[in-house]
Amino acid sequence: MKSSVAIAVAALLVSAPIHAEEAFLTLTRSAYPRADLPSSEDVVAPDAFSTFDAQNAGEAVSHASSVQTLPIGELGSLQTARIRGATSNQTLLLIDGRPVAGTALGTQDLSEIPTEQIDHVEIVRGGVSALYGPNAMGGVINVITRRALTQPNGEAGFEVGSYGREAYRANFGSRVGPLDYFLFGDQQDESGFRDNSDARDHNVGGNVGLSMGAGGKLLFDVSSYHNNAGIPGELYPDIPTNQYNSSIEKQAADPNARQVTDTNYLRTGYILPLPMNALMTLHVFGSQREADYTDPDNFVDSDRHEQSKGGDAQFDLPYGLSVGGNFVHDREDASNLITPSNTFIRSVENWGLFAEETFHCDRFAVIPSGRFDHNSQFGDAKNPRVQLIADALPWLRFSGSVARSFRAPTIDDLYYPLTNFGTFDGVNFSYQGNPNLQPERAWTYDAGFEVHPDSFSFRATYFRANVTDLIQTTTDPASTTVNIGTARRQGAEIQIDHVLNAYFRDEWNYTYLENVGIPVGYTDFVALPYSPKHTVNYLATIMPVRGMTVNSTVRYIDSSFSSNDETGTKIGSRVLWDLRLAYDWCRIQAYVGVKDVTDRRYEEQAGYPLPGRTFFGGVTVRFSGKPS
């Protein structure tokens, strides 16, 4: 099995792109047959996330099973993701298998990855530090970028929406002899739902590949993101949703705060087929992100510059063996122009070696893997993982995994300089990082099954994570970060896909989550913040006549709280319903849609109200390729 996969990888990467329906890369770091995946893996493709008008990677995965996104606004606002109750720092974001934010730069913003760049998104739920190293405790979100098809193909589109939103998009890819290339770009503007929430951003990038036959293939990828946005800030005290009146929730806590963000990413690679169906893959990659934040009302003027660079090597060898390693150097330059003493420059390095073997015997697959990491700050970490897959019948598959994973402390956790936040109620509060922190650690388990007769599939998975050494901030006036927390996360996932006929298909997923821990100041397990027990996503696609498609998307999220032990702001339960109508004629698609049809006023994070009902519409022209 593995030798045939190696041949497929060589063929796909040297002469054509890999697509979601063909192979899954993230489970084993090599192409694994999509039809043979365990129940804990998912693929999100553009034909799914376009149904709710996703604009970026965060919105694209927002309806996936056990994935919780926490947006704080619309265009230009931070959007993070959590898997199975793990925090965003414990959920690893990759682009084509490379870490977006290194290992020590903290929260990864999915809003900076536009949908024009995405071929599909692969999601692995559960710990996978055995293959990817730090920060993969909850799981991995791997964005696979688009590459050229075998014939010229491109699109251009224009979209308008509520609150003055305008979006312009274009992409084009082709192959000329041994050379393939794909280019994309977009620009978006929005006046904003809240005061001081206007934003303008643009993305531009692409990739080039040079096939050299038996000499392998060279790859070059580049992307650039720019955003200039008002930052309305957190409303405090928060406004209960039953008091929203289309006015009070729009007020800005910080009416003059702004942030300018520039993110650039560069990757080069070399892929070489070796004898005996083996394959060598080499990559060098680097990224930098600069965020300039000013708030004259609160005397804030800061410049945060993050850099991550590194490389990796992987060898897919005969008899199902893959080995490799990587090195990542992260650096943070934080400048405070108001309080120069809070300026600092720090760096952290991490390197690791991994091995993975795929054994197949009749209807069974056993995939053991393990990784050794060395971090310049805390030392060594060893993490094993075993994945089991059994096809009991042609229509019935069982699967399960056991893994150990870890989350590395961020540079801010470790080195943030002593900062005085002022005096409140006669008490002076300050904070300082802790260079003696150890990584957070977890054992994760899951077991599930899939029933997949014709035109129907049912998947159910039980999962559990036991987490120790959580990094938390003490509550005393002279606060710092310490390793004292524990957590226990468990629950179940159910997924159903159903094709009734040529006119109707639907899919839905349900997640039950129990997310408890012992945080600072507690002696027993209590509910952790932002942990809804029940989440349901439903998507129905109706095609009443040729060329017309109606998508109805419904999302239910149970209530949760912003602080431990069901304290702080209550984030009420909510049902969000989106509709989209599209009509395809020749090479043109015209579409209109409504988000939040029932005009539900809500928020995902306390103090950050989100708009109710909004409208959008647009036109996309496919100016090359085969007509539909």
Image (cartoon, helix red, strand yellow):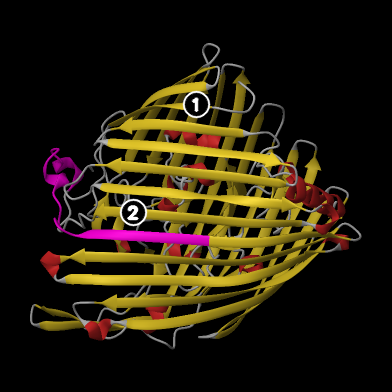
Front residue (pair 215, 287) = 215
Task: Tell me: residue 374, above or below residue 562.
Answer: below
Looking at the rendered structure, the kind of residue marked 2 is Asn
**Residue 346 in view, yes or no:** yes
Q: Is residue 521 left or right of residue 628?
A: left
Q: Characterize the local packing of mark 1: few (<14), some (14-19) or many (20 or more) Cα atoms within 10 angstroms.
A: some
Front residue (pair 198, 151) = 151
**Residue 581 in view, yes or no:** no
Could you tell which of marks 1 and 2 lies nearer the N-terminus? 2
Q: In this view, does 439 lie to the left or right of 411?
A: right
In three-dimensional space, the C-alpha distance between marks 1 and 2, rounded to whole angstroms, equals: 26 Å
Q: Residue at x 44, y 37 (%)?
A: 169
* Image spot of residue 99 (x, y percent): 55, 64
User: Which residue is identified by label 2?
Assistant: 227
* Image spot of residue 52 (x, y percent): 43, 34
Q: What element carries label 2?
A: strand
